[in-house]
Image (cartoon, rainbow, N blue to C red):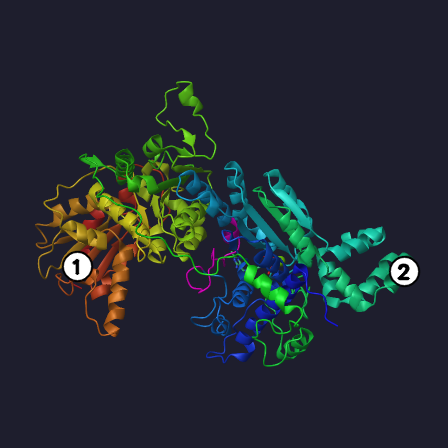
Amino acid sequence: MLKPVTTDIESLKILDDRLRWLSAWTIHHANHIRTSADGLKVGGHQASCASMTSIMAALYFHALGPNDRVAVKPHAGPVLHAIHYLLGTQSREALENFRGFGGAQSYPSRTKDRIPVDFSTGSVGLGVAITAFSSLIQDYLTAHGRMDEADRGRFVALIGDAELDEGNIYEALIEGAKHDVRNLWWIVDYNRQSLDATSADRMFERFDEIFRSCGWRVVELRYGKRLKAALDANPNLRGWFEQLSNAELSALHYQGGEALRKRIGADLGKSSAAFLKTHDDPALAGLFSDLGGHCMESLVEAFDAARDDVPTLFMAWTIKGYGLPFAGHKDNHAGLMNPTQMSAWREAMGVAEGNEWEPLESVGDNARPGVEALIDKSRIAREKRSRAFGQIEIPALPVPSGEEQSTQAAFGRILLEIAKAGGSLADRIVTTSPDVTVSTNLGAWVNQRGLFRREAVDDIFAKQKIASAQKWSAGNTGQHIELGIAENNLFLMLAAAGLAGDMYGARLAPIGTLYDPFIARGLDALNYACYQDARLLLVSTPSGITLGPEGGAHQSINPPLIALGQPGLRHYEPAYADELAAMMELAFRLIDDPHGESSYLRLSTRSVRQLEREDDSWQEGALKGGYWLRAPAPGSEAAIVAMGAVMPEALAAWEELRDDIPGLGLLSVTSPDLLHRGWTAAQAARWAGRREPSHIEQLLSPLGRNAGLVTIADAAPASLSWIGGVLGQRVAPLGVERFGQTGSLPDLYAAYRLDGNAITEAVAELLLPA
Ligand SMILES: Cc1ncc(C[n+]2csc(CCOP(=O)(O)OP(=O)(O)O)c2C)c(N)n1
Ligand SMILES: [Mg+2]
């Protein structure tokens, strides 16, 4: 007799099993079957995957629409690959090469995986929070007429319960509440286990309260249908179950039916006899494993009931390692089934030896049509979206006039001119700042272009005719997104805006401003933006001890070194307004170029006398990382190499020394980052047979072989001192190595050896015979 055709729920349960099998097998194959070239443990997280295959089956084969975007918990990456394997969009070869060179990545990666990955994940917490900012960007794009209503989607984050400890999640929660964020589903795989241990009981239900108080709907999926029915019928049993600590419950899941029977009998005595009699050990284990996050009916119902745009937190109770031999064991985070366990589990899953990679292995003939239909019906995007570039017309940017000006002031004025002139670039720029809009000189831009708010908000001060330089109306055409003081949020907002072209086909030119020292505060989020190849312009100001009276807590030292080591981010440190204009123009081009990258401009509040240029020949070098402000004579025995705000000291020292040291050069470095990259790239190219000296090699080559270089920057001296290694020239590095303090510039420059005296002494020392 033919069995009845399977329902969608039954098919989803089969898909859940397939995902659990394929994810565990992918990891097993990489660790136990693929030959190892180096003897290193490959790793992977079978338990973390098994914990959420039901949730992901319900999402990807039922709930998600084509415009929805998902940030998958990093260590559930293999489940995402298994989903695409079932859809036919991931290859067996990539799975066999999981965690291998060119294979499926350990954690979902937008840029490296061949399947469409909406958000890279890896550093826990960031993937969660970026969904909130992406949702805001979706609202921004629709409000600005750059995206059709029909293309809007929901943003889903799949979260580990221990991930909820990451503070950046709450920073995003607060910012999201301020902006009335919507279309978010955050789904917690509430397996109550982290990497090291079981989760703290004291946080039980606290998360719900936190989210509710921020206006979220919280849906708790604690029990599956069967377990709920059993507990409803046995109030004693419910009481017993609910008082178990996380650790006790996990231990019982691990120990299984026999242990459950003993424990229930011991704790509840005679009152549990009837219940225990009707459940054998496997039935007990099965029943108590029927938590909400493993119950397909409950998941589907919950997702179907939350289709409005209210941000929703789902607390889906699960068992870490569900269905695997180490289910519930507190040490199972990186646990791998050994070959014997795998073999037994393979049998239990109905997978024939040799057929491990068969996508629908173990699915019976009767069930197959239903399962195949669900796979076909899955509405998620199957192909990577094309990355929209080349959308912005970028004009030559005006150089602000003024004999004396700071790069920070020039930045504000350039943006103001762009805003006033209007056009493609002006309309694509979106600015954002963590409560330092005014003090980083974005105020005039915001006066012109307004704050972005979905609902118009009056400027009460303007209405009351109270004088203020900041006339900030807010509405859905505004182009500045205000943020509270949370630098993680700044970088996540920039990341989301910087992916607008990739995600929604509408390239934006995002500019974020903050004080230079506070880059460190959001550094992982900045790295995260770069890792995903989001395109943005970061403007940090003020910087260095040149900030003067503000003192050591605000005087940045190491950001140029951070930038030197940060892929995907180009650091420029201009000394003059005309350099800044050229760098901003290029930064916008790099945002809109498939081969571009993000830029970081480190600016200063120090007003300096501008140069009278004879021509534009400086420009090419300035954009490549450096140019001779005072060219050296051939064979010159010394040069000053200076960057940014201390250029006046370098120029003055050059004037003073030029008679004593004929041919002395002054090299203006605008980007140690680009110079260093060029140097190593030229080296690599030489090994590949191409001989083209790098920009820094060309710059230094006129100097004598044994020339001495005095490098100086308002930053860690290592930012420039490496330049001596390029041609093997001697270096005296000047810069800041101790925390700054309050003071006037002459006092500070003297104390930290950034003044003319220091340069003169350093040059003299280099020129002394050894
Ligand atoms: C920022 C950061 N810190 C530490 C880690 C290492 N790490 C990866 S997963 C994990 C524990 C996660 O537990 P949970 O979120 O509950 O996920 P589960 O595997 O239990 O689903 C840790 C500490 C990381 N990936 N990112
Ligand atoms: Mg967990």
Main SS of the magenta part reads loop
As drawn, is 224 to the left or to the right of 504?
right
Task: Please tell me the numbered disc located at residue 699.
Answer: 1
Residue that protrudes farthest toward the top in the picture: 465
Q: What's drawn in magenta, residue-wise?
A: 110-129
**Numbered disc in front, either 2 or 1:** 2
User: SS at mark 2?
Assistant: helix
Please state the total of marks drawn on the protein image: 2
Q: Amino acid at mark 2?
A: Ala
439 shown above or below 239: above
User: SS at mark 1?
Assistant: helix
Q: Which quadrant of the picture is home to ligand 1?
A: bottom right
Q: Give the residue pinned by disc 2.
A: 274
Indicate which disc, 2 or 1, sits on the residue closer to the N terminus: 2
Q: Amino acid at mark 1?
A: Leu
Residue that protrudes farthest toward the front in the picture: 1
Which quadrant does the C terminus fall into?
A: bottom left
Task: Please tell me the numbered disc located at residue 462.
Answer: none
Q: Quadrant of residue 480?
A: top left
| Residue 498 spot, x, y in % from top left | 39, 49
As drawn, is 285 to the left or to the right of 431?
right
- 19 magenta-colored: no
